[in-house]
């Protein structure tokens, strides 16, 4: 495995498992395609990879995002009002 630092992913080609990167260095204007056996995209909420993959299937990214808090039960003693608010939230799963 090769780790490429200082680049941002600009595009994906899932048919040939490759992706296009651009250097963050302003002196390097070029872009290059990197071939891979597997593309593991962990690019977050506004994922270019998810948008591109969904487009291949004729779908459109909803643009929605989600979050979840991870809290210790002991925190309820320190923040009772906040805990009460969180406890009453309606949680949706999709």
Image (cartoon, rainbow, N blue to C red):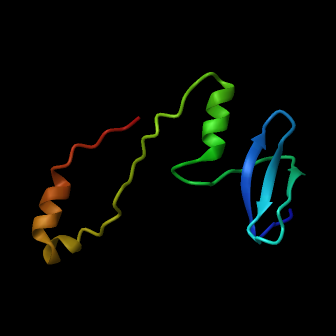
Residue 63 against residue 3 in the figure, above or below = above
Residue 93 against residue 57 in the figure, above or below = below
The quadrant where residue 77 appears: bottom left
Where is residue 26 shown, x and y percent of the image?
A: 76, 70
Where is residue 80 shown, x and y percent of the image?
A: 11, 69
Tell whether 58 sits left or right of 83: right
Residue 26 against residue 92 in the figure, above or below = below
- Quarter of the image with the C terminus in it: top left
Query: For the point 51% across and 50% down, which residue is it?
Result: 45
Tell whether 55 sits left or right of 46: right
Tell whether 74 sits left or right of 52: left
Residue that sits furthest to the bottom in the current view: 78
Query: For the point 78% across and 37% down, which residue is it?
Result: 14
Where is residue 36 shown, x and y percent of the image?
A: 87, 49
The quadrant where residue 51 appears: top right
The quadrant where residue 81 appears: bottom left
- Quarter of the image with the N terminus in it: bottom right
Query: For the point 20% across and 57% down, which residue is it?
Result: 86
């Amino acid at each position: 495995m090769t780790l490429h630092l200082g680049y941002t992913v600009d595009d994906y080609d899932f048919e040939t498992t490759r992706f296009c990167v651009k250097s963050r260095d302003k002196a390097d204007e070029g872009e290059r395609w990197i071939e891979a056996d597997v593309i593991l995209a962990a690019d977050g909420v506004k994922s270019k990879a998810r948008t591109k993959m969904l487009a291949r299937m004729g779908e459109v990214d909803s643009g929605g995002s989600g979050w979840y808090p991870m809290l210790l039960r002991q925190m309820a003693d320190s923040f009772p009002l906040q805990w009460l608010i969180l406890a009453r939230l309606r949680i949706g799963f999709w």
